[in-house]
Amino acid sequence: MIKPEIVPAAQLDLPAIRDLTRRAYGENVPMGFRFVAVRQTMNGLLRDWRQGILWKALLDGALAGTIRLTPRPQGWLYVNRLCVDPPLQGRGLGARLMAFAEGEARRRGLLSVRLDTAMGFAPLVDWYRRQGYVIVSAAKYTDVPHFSVILEKRI
Ligand SMILES: CC(C)(COP(=O)(O)OP(=O)(O)OC[C@H]1O[C@@H](n2cnc3c(N)ncnc32)[C@H](O)[C@@H]1OP(=O)(O)O)[C@@H](O)C(=O)NCCC(=O)NCCS
């Protein structure tokens, strides 16, 4: 099993995180899913970094993935921008990042982990379901062309 090191991102990591995020989310575009993250900007990342919500996953010391964890007043830890560098996908790192989010939610005394994704992206929705997430609602956000589902795992 892979053993990533998951730690807060440093300011110096931001250009590499932007490139990785665009690369990973870019792979969804030909499948018809244009998430906001495909347009990830340095300004957005700088804001996230200043808020302390940006994390990086390292494999053998090198950047391999990233995740944004935002606590919400409702008691949720909201996951966004989960991605793994395409050549490193399929080895369990995405699942390790989700398990990390759940551990953080538990450590912070929160109620659940929440995220949203594209309603029609069946392999991704099924992947979250296999990790214990259930669909709690649906939405049409204005910044993406697709309908979204909101998934939750109680901690
Ligand atoms: C989703 C993502 C983080 C998973 O990372 P990963 O390291 O490959 O994840 P794992 O190795 O733990 O698991 C791979 C799983 O992804 C599923 N999966 C995710 N996206 C998929 C896709 N587009 N096509 C096929 N399978 C996909 C596979 O079914 C596989 O499931 P299994 O292990 O139960 O067989 C990665 O595919 C990614 O970065 N995608 C682009 C960004 C993205 O879509 N992020 C989520 C937005 S809500």
Image: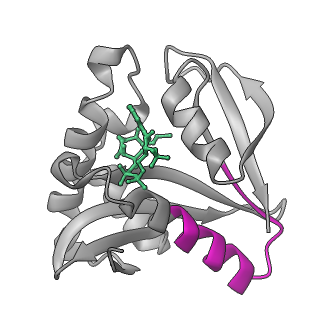
User: Outermost residue toward the bottom?
Assistant: 107
Which residue is at a point 19% across and 40% down the rendered structure image? Answer: 23
Residue at 33% across / 71% down in the picture? 56
Residue 101 within the magenta-colored segment of the rendering: yes
Question: Which quadrant of the view contains residue 126?
Answer: top right
Q: Tell me the residue at 30%/61% (across/down).
A: 65
114 and 2: which is toward the camera: 2
User: In the displayed structure, does residue 81 sit left or right of residue 63?
Assistant: right
Q: Quadrant location of the C terminus?
A: bottom right
Left-right relation of 96 to 15? right
Which percent across, then down, holds residue 132? 71, 53
Query: Can you tell me which quadrant of the image ligand 1 is in?
Result: top left
Q: From which residue to which does the magenta span run? A: 98-114
Q: Quadrant of residue 148?
A: top right
Q: Position of residue 71 (x, y in %)?
A: 67, 66
In the displayed structure, 5 sits above or below 115; it is below
Image-based side of 57 in relation to 114, left or right = left
Q: What residue is shown at x 46% (from left), y 65% (from top)?
A: 97
On the image, the x and y values in percent for residue 142 come to 57, 20
Q: Is residue 122 above or below residue 106?
A: above
Percent across and percent down for residue 66 are 35, 61
Taking depth in this image into account, of 99 and 63 the one nearest to the observer is 99
